[in-house]
Image (cartoon, rainbow, N blue to C red):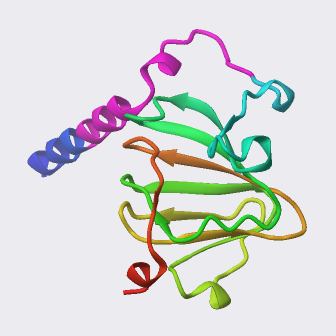
Amino acid sequence: MKNVRIAVLVASLTSTITLTAHADKHMMMKTHPVIRPSADLKWSPLVPELGAKGPQISVVFGDLKKGPVGLLLKQPAGARPGPHTHTSDYWAVVVSGQLQDFEPGKGDTAARLGAGSWWMQPGKAAHDNHCDEKSECVLFAYFPRGFDFAPVAAAKAER
């Protein structure tokens, strides 16, 4: 029984150390809260050619390219980025608006996700996201291995 307790303790410590290693070192070194009102967020166009009329991101913590990174993504009402993949798995939570996340070709049956809804998307899995036409969508996403965006041809995505 003692060996089982030691094994559980070692497994718990290993998990804690692994999770801590993935946390943003700079945020962990803070000795006071970091507070950022929404009016002070710095938004960057995800598609430079579209500027503020297209999707925008605001990095909350981490390294956008290498990860881990937590970011806010703001999409205009009616946004439809098309089938795409990301190298990293990601977890997302809807902050405002209503959107759908689905496998290509399954948009008609995809659940509508409102504020507080969340999903996990495996890395390299083709998917699409549609923002409702009535209002912009804002979501928070966490990418352990950095953020990227790779469009996928519709025919290839539906295989």
| Residue positioned most to the front | 49
Relative to 54, residue 57 above or below: above
Q: Is 31 contained in the magenta span? A: yes
Which residues make up the magenta segment? 12-35
| Direction from residue 4 to residue 117 in the image, left or right | right
* Point 69% across, 70% down: residue: 130
Residue 9 locus on image (x, y percent): 23, 40
Residue 96 locus on image (x, y percent): 80, 55
Front-most of residues 2 and 91: 91
Front-most of residues 90 and 65: 65
* Point 19% across, 46% down: residue: 5
| Residue positioned most to the left | 3
Give the quadrant of residue 107. Answer: bottom right
Q: Is 33 contained in the magenta span? A: yes
Front-most of residues 148 and 111: 148
* Point 64% across, 56% down: residue: 93
Residue 77 locus on image (x, y percent): 83, 62
Relative to 48, residue 62 above or below: above
Quarter of the image with the C terminus in it = bottom left
| Residue positioned most to the bottom | 109
